[in-house]
Amino acid sequence: MTPPRPTQLAQIILREAIRSGDTVIDATAGHGHDTVFLAECVGEPGRVMAFDIQEAAILSARAKVMAACLAAQVEFYQTSHARMVQVAVAESISAVMFNLGYLPGGDQDLTTRARPTLIALNGAAVLLKPGGVLSVICYPGHPAGAEEAPAVESWMNTQTSNGWSAAKYAMLGTLTPAPFLLVARKP
């Protein structure tokens, strides 16, 4: 048996935490895979707020959401994930999902960066309800990710001193730095 990829594992974990009618955030909409997953989880009465700075990502994610007939519950924001705290209400969000890095098939110079991601994580901490879940997939195998991944992991470690429970899931014995998943639950 091959262990699940970080993206699969994040969905397995979040599926248990999200209920029909919840409001959730896809902090990095990308091609819309997580946006569709989240929209399926919250159902028709729920709401997904999907963020991405790139127009190509928003267009791709919107097309995927429309093809899945889930457009009614998804709102797209073409802006940095660092601005989510300006759009959502404090302690109103059940889950926030980050899939960092660059848009697959897109310009690899347009990538998430440590500073805005840390701002976004601080915002997610404010927005999550007590018991809310945060998932972050980090990609340390490219230059920006090599800086961003340890900063995100350090941020997660700091949250445990504030009562959060957190875990890291990573492949062992890889030749290059493998993507990994960080998951935390707000107390």
Image: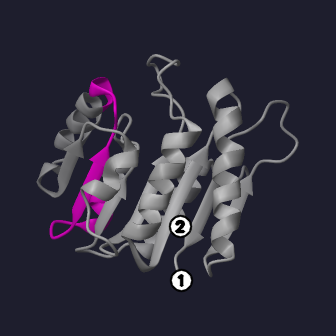
Q: Which residues are magenta?
A: 38-57
Provide the residue designation for mark 1: 187
Q: At x 83% / y 37%, what residue is drawn?
A: 174
> Helix, strand or loop at disc 2?
helix
Q: Looking at the picture, how far across and down is residue 12, in whole percent?
A: 52, 63
Judge whether residue 142 is colored magenta.
no
Label 1: state its secondary structure.
Answer: loop
Q: Position of residue 187 (x, y in %)?
A: 53, 83
* Towards the viewer: 28 or 119: 119
Between circles 2 and 1, the one closer to the viewer is 1
Please state which amino acid type lies under the numbered disc 1: Pro
Q: Magenta span has 41?
A: yes
Q: Look at mark 2 in the image and give the residue it sits on.
A: 13
Q: Earlier in the sequence, mark 2 or mark 1?
A: 2
- Residue 46, can we see it? yes
Residue at 30%, 38% (x, y): give it.
79
The image position of residue 49, as x and y in percent, is: 26, 54
Residue 128 is left or right of residue 161, and the answer is: left
Which residue ends up furthest to the left in the rendered image? 72
Q: Between residues 146 and 167, which one lies in front from this camera angle? A: 146
Name the quadrant containing residue 113: top right
